[in-house]
Amino acid sequence: MKTFLVIAAVLGLSSTAALAECAGHNVTASAKVDKEMTTASIAASAADKTSEQAVLLKRQQTEEEAEVTE
């Protein structure tokens, strides 16, 4: 049992020492790809475009009505 604990402790300490960042190690984990952010764009469907046009027409109509009532 003691042997198992010693082996586990040695493996645990050696892995943390191997992964530690210090002046002697050249860490390349933060590549340019990791820091660059891209966003995706979604093309509007025909139904979305027609509903958008309907909204714009309604706005124009309400603006015209507001001008007439003033």
Image: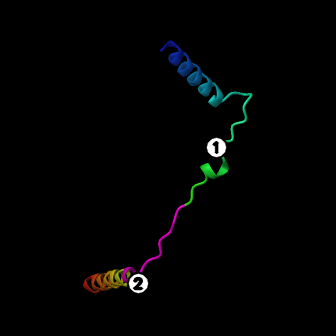
Give, as a single range, the part of the protein colored magenta: 39-49
Q: Is residue 19 magenta?
A: no
Main SS type for the magenta part? loop
Q: Nearer the viewer, residue 12 or 40?
A: 12
Separation of residues labelled 1 and 2 (CA atoms): 42 Å
Asked whether 41 falls inside the magenta stretch, the response is yes
Residue occupying the point 69% across, 27% down: 22
| Residue drawn at point x = 59 percent, y = 26 percent | 16
Left or right of 65, for residue 17: right
- Quadrant into which the C terminus falls: bottom left
- Secondary structure under badge 2? helix
The numbered mark at residue 46 is 2
Disc 1 or disc 2, which is closer to the eye? 1
Q: Position of residue 1 (x, y in %)?
A: 47, 15
Seen in the image, is 61 located left or right of residue 33? left
Q: Are marks 1 and 2 in contact (CB under 8 Å)?
A: no
Query: Which residue reaches farthest top?
Result: 2
- Residue 54: give x, y in percent of width and height: 33, 84
Q: Callout 2 environment at 10 Å: few (<14), some (14 to 19), or many (20+)?
A: few
Q: Which residue is mark 1?
A: 30
Q: Amino acid at mark 1?
A: Ser
Indicate which disc residue 61 carries: none
Q: Which numbered disc flags the more N-terminal residue, 1 or 2?
A: 1
As helix, strand or loop, the secondary structure at mark 1 comes to loop
Between residues 9 and 32, which one lies in front from this camera angle? 9
Q: Amino acid at mark 2?
A: Ala
Q: Quadrant of residue 48?
A: bottom left
Which residue shows up at 66% across the image and 50% down it? 32
- Image check: 43 left or right of 54? right
